[in-house]
Amino acid sequence: MKLTRDHGAERKVLLGVRPSALRLDDAGVPARVYLTEQLGDSVLVDLHLGHTMVRARLPEKTRLAEGAEVRLTFDPADAHLFDRESGRRL
């Protein structure tokens, strides 16, 4: 991801979202279920999002089959941006 600074220069950034902030939504971005792990109070789901592996922590009632296509979203307020070069949070 790239952001444009106020003076026009571009900065490469990394987007960080906590697993508990991700949720399933038909309007979200497509991802494929790789692995699920029932934890009792929730389910950890590892997903392929393009070429990136992401982890979501979903409600315990969530049942997803490995290989299933789902759509993920999050509230933009839960997003964290990091400078790609330094790793510092912006």
Image (cartoon, rainbow, N blue to C red):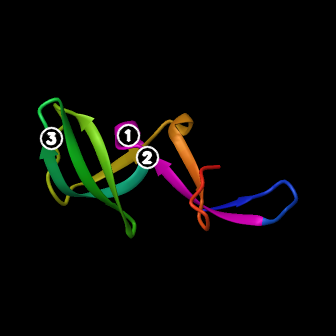
Disc 3, SS: loop
Disc 1, SS: strand
Residue 33, located in which quarter of the rendered image?
bottom left
Which one is in front, 60 or 5?
5
Instruction: Give residue 25's mark.
Output: 1
Q: Residues within 10 Å of mark 3 (few under 14, many from 20)?
A: few
Instruction: Give residue 28's mark.
Output: 2
Q: Position of residue 62 (x, y in %)?
A: 19, 36
Please, which residue is most extreme toward the right here?
Answer: 7
Q: Is residue 13 above or below residue 45?
A: below
Q: Is residue 86 above or below residue 69?
A: below
Relative horizontal placement of residue 76, taking residue 23 as reference (left or right): right
Instruction: Give residue 6's mark.
Output: none
Which one is in front, 39 or 75?
39
Q: Which residue is mark 3?
A: 63
Residue range (magenta)? 10-27
| CB atoms of marks 2 and 3 within 8 Å | no
Q: Amino acid at mark 3?
A: Arg
Q: Position of residue 19 (x, y in %)?
A: 35, 43
Q: CA distance from mark 2 to mark 3?
A: 18 Å
Q: Amino acid at mark 1?
A: Asp
Q: CA distance from mark 3 to mark 1?
A: 14 Å
> Looking at the image, which residue is at 43% across and 46% down?
28
Q: Residues within 10 Å of mark 2 (few under 14, many from 20)?
A: few
Q: Is residue 25 above or below residue 61?
A: below
Q: Position of residue 26 (x, y in %)?
A: 38, 42
Q: Quadrant of the N terminus?
A: bottom right
Q: Residues within 10 Å of mark 1 (few under 14, many from 20)?
A: few
| CB atoms of marks 2 and 1 within 8 Å | yes
> Looking at the image, which residue is at 31% across and 45% down?
56
Q: CA distance from mark 2 to mark 1?
A: 5 Å
> Looking at the image, which residue is at 53% across and 54% down?
15
